[in-house]
Amino acid sequence: MASIIKQRKVVADNWQLLKPQAGGGAPPIPESGDIIVPLAVWLDQRNALLSRPGRLGVWLGGDDEPALIAEDLKNFGVVAVHFPQFTDGRGYSLGRLLRERYGWRGELRAIGDVLRDQLLYLSRCGFDAFALREDQDLQAALCAFSDFSEAYQATADQPLPLFRRRFLASPDGMEWS
Amino acid sequence: MYIYDEIDQRLVEERVAQYRDQTRRFLAGKLSEDEFRPLRLQNGLYIQRFAPMLRVAIPYGLLSSRQLRALAYIARTWDRGYGHFSTRQNIQFNWPKLEDVPDILAKLATVQMHAIQTSGNCVRNITTDHFAGIAPDEIVDPLVWCEVVRQWSAFHPEFAYLPRKFKIAIAGGEQDRAAVQVHDIGLQARRGPDGNVGFRVLVGGGLGRTPIIGVVVREFLPWQHLLTYLDAILRVYNRYGRRDNKYKARIKILVKELAPEVFRRKVEQEWAHLKNGPATLIIEEIGRIERRFTRPGYQKLEPIAPEYTLELGRDKGFANWARRNVHPHKMPGYAAVTLSLKKTGVPPGDATADQMDAVADLAERYSFGELRVSHEQNLILADVRQSDLHALWQEARTLGLATPNIGLLTNIISCPGGDFCSLANAKSIPVAEAIQRRFDDLDYLHDIGELDLNISGCMNSCGHHHVGHIGILGVDKQGAEYYQISIGGAQGNDASLGKVLGPAVSQAEVPDVIEKLIETYLARRDSDEERFIDVVRRIGIEPFKEHVYGLNHKATESRSRQLAAA
């Protein structure tokens, strides 16, 4: 069984990630078990997927439009975003949109080329689960979450930017810290 | 100076610790080259031709004497005793060791400095007018807004892996001295219908391979919405910018490929969701940042100091320098001074550690302990009493920092070029030097008048050759270094991109070509008032071309066209 980082702990994971076949065709759907399917498969086989036993998740690629699942989120046990390369930053925006615009509260998982040194920014963009690349040391990677103790911006994990929190704490001087 | 608070300081220190650990893991073989690359780039470290190059951020070009002394210390301790001030108001060290960089960053942190996001595909150092805060014509002090944007951009988690680098410039008023038209985002302060402050927002300008002037996406954005609007632009770029080809990955290509109207609509749609959200700025925050800036304690002075007028009449050398290197100030009796880093024989923008220490002293004695780096790669003392100018000039002269050439041909903007940079096709520094030597006669130089000459060693255009009145671009011609000359570029409100004059020439020929361009200009100008760029705009490039390549260049061109068609 694979391990992932979830809510800053290393945990066992039994979700099965389904990928398009080599030719681009839809992957065969296993009869049971918890599966995460590509967005296109969800859009195509919605009813069949909903009637099968086992939990259901969906994953988005960098090009995918999260608005397409905005109304469907209640059906999913996990929403994942795929990073083809760790330097491809599109998924950071998708994470924030899923959390902040579409209100996804469940597990938001980063999959693909997910490495230790990107974990903190990913978590600030709303990701709380990380299926790291196979060669990564999960236990060691946990340190990455505490690289920084504060942040200026409003993000998925901290809806108020630093300046608003300062203002609330000390409206007159704004010199709280 | 903006003075860090406890959180600003803590974040910079945490960054040093983070990078120290990343460097350690890289050296231990736990991070591959590819995995380490974006991490070191976002801490300013390039691997260059001979050694790594470390680019240290000088936010919006503002430095204190204490910080400049720390840079001198770094130059002496970890480099070869000098540094290079860049066109983006930063400083670069060309010889640090990769394993020393964490210590250098730790030293920087002790003086509230860093190298965060000075490279990599993220939001880079915010740049502005080097006369910010003292210019008589500005609507707001852009330094305050630069710091607001700096804090927004620093460690922004969503925009650390953009398709490509991202540069933002802010101008404080209508007169643009920050080159807002050639940045990924240019912000220009203006007043709205009710007299309230806001910004004109330009997007998609840039130099590089595809030089282009930015388009206005919003004529007036009230200041409260600045950060949410930036978030909207960056999000559209992050999601839809091209990632398949690094030469087509800048936002300017996205704006062009979508068409500016479509791009604007996408931004406005995105912004509709973010507008009035928690990132909307509040006046208390602007006030807080404003108050964290130390301000010079100006004295009440007469508008014109009598001793200044006296020395100007008495000393021709001083008067020459004052004419070029002294600039108006909003406070009566004060002036801004450019210390030229463009002395002939010294690579443009280079300063030795000793010079840095000396300039730090000058700043302390004459300008409230502060200075600025200009995008023309000079140093500026922004708050000097007119009555001190003569004494300052004498000291600057002994230091080799009083070349009276600001705005003139020898105030060359140049990238480090092939002597240092692994991207360059050709050398820049020897070309700059050869031109400076050719135009060493001060009277001749002053007679030629205002002229921007910019040199880039390759089409990444770090030397901004597209917006030089004369631009020189290093190109590779079958393995040999050649130079393509263009004329007619300009920065500022009437920004334009230069046009290529003709076939590239060898290094030895460059000074002759420049000389011929100048001869054409002098022969064709209406009066001393008409600048080189004005003449190019009036008569076009053809007369210049003819004088440089000879009358038969047309015949040659048409022959080569026929050959190409055959």
Image (cartoon, helix red, strand yellow):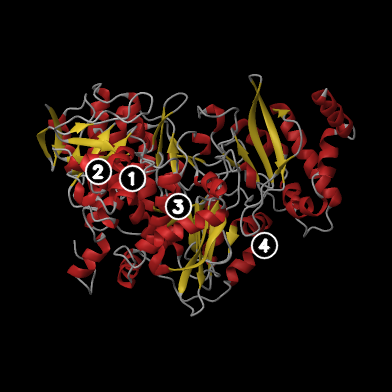
Q: Can you identify the residue that label 3 sits on?
A: B61
Depth check, mark 4 against mark 3: the one in front is 3
Q: Nearer the viewer, residue A65 or B354?
A: A65
Q: Residues within 10 Å of mark 2 (few under 14, many from 20)?
A: few
Nearer the N terminus, badge 3 or badge 1?
A: 3
How far is disc 4 from disc 3 in space, using C-alphas? 34 Å
Amino acid carrying label 1: it is His
Which of the two labelled residues, at mark 4 and mark 3, occupies the earlier sequence position?
3
Q: Which residue is mark 1?
A: B114
Q: CA distance from mark 4 to mark 2?
A: 93 Å
Q: Which residue is mark 4?
A: B314
Disc 4: host chain: B
Q: Is residue B47 left or right of residue A48?
A: right
Which residue is nearer to you in this view: A15 or B59?
A15
User: Please, what is the three-letter code of the amino acid marked with disc 4?
Assistant: Arg
The number of numbered discs placed on residues in the rendered structure image is: 4
Q: CA distance from mark 1 to mark 4?
A: 45 Å
Chain bearing tag 3 is B
- Give residue B171's position: percent from left, percent from top: 51, 61
- Write down the residue under mark 2: A47
Label 1 residue SS:
loop
Residue depicted at 16% across the width and 34% down the height: A15
Residue B560, compared with residue B181, is above or below; it is above
Name the residue nearer the viewer: A114 or B379.
Answer: A114
Q: Residues within 10 Å of mark 3 (few under 14, many from 20)?
A: many
Q: Earlier in the sequence, mark 1 or mark 4?
A: 1
**Quarter of image, res B224:** bottom left
Please say whether residue B62 is visible from this viewpoint: no
Q: Of the residues tagged 3 and 2, which is closer to the observer? A: 2
| Position above or below: B249 against B289 | above
SS at badge 2 = helix
Query: Neighbour class for label 1 at 10 Å: few (<14), some, many (≥20)?
Result: many
